[in-house]
Amino acid sequence: MNTPSKADFSFLLPISVKWGEMDALGHVNNTVFFRYAEDGRIDYFHRLAGTDRNAWSVGPILADLRGSFQRQLHYPAEVVIGTRVARIGGSSMALEQALFGADNDTLFATFETATVWFDFKTQASIRVDDAARARIADAEVIKPEM
């Protein structure tokens, strides 16, 4: 992933850093960064497909997640997590995420995620359908590779 900016993302989720997210070293614990990334992914797909999980017969499941820490984050802080689909393959999608300061482009972390499009009834991966591809492409500032 190239160095991202907020302008690269159509989906930015605001997050308030909480006191209890700090560790003994006085900065936000690294595991919390991964929870922020999860919040961003869930928000992304809910905004595209709705929040009624019972209505979802197919959707994304997490296959791989990698994070790269750029700088420490301390309480109090307001941040945003940007989420975008960078590539859509046959049955997979590559997501890129970045954690920024809410009022500036200060970059705290980046994440690269592989998701698999999954049929929850048959418990098998399936091709990302054309309707999902179109919804994602229409929503993105930077169109995903297909």
Image: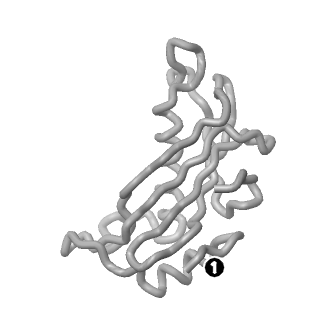
Outermost residue to the left: 122
Q: Regarding mark 1 in the picture, which secondary structure is present there?
A: helix
| Residue lying at 54% horizontally and 65% vertically, measured from the top left | 47
Q: Quadrant of residue 135?
A: bottom right
Q: Quadrant of the N terminus?
A: bottom right
Q: Position of residue 29 (x, y in %)?
A: 51, 26
The residue pinned by badge 1 equals 138
Is residue 89 shown above or below 30?
below
Is residue 47 shown above or below 112?
below
| Residue lying at 72% horizontally and 51% vertically, measured from the top left | 3
The amino acid type of the residue labelled 1 equals Asp
Outermost residue to the top: 24
Is residue 21 shown above or below 7?
above
Work out whether residue 91 or residue 46 is closer to the camera in this orientation and state it. Answer: 91
Q: Position of residue 4 (x, y in %)?
A: 71, 53
Work out whether residue 78 or residue 87 is closer to the camera in this orientation and state it. Answer: 87
| Residue lying at 50% horizontally and 74% vertically, measured from the top left | 88
| Residue lying at 60% horizontally and 31% vertically, measured from the top left | 17
Q: Quadrant of residue 141?
A: bottom right
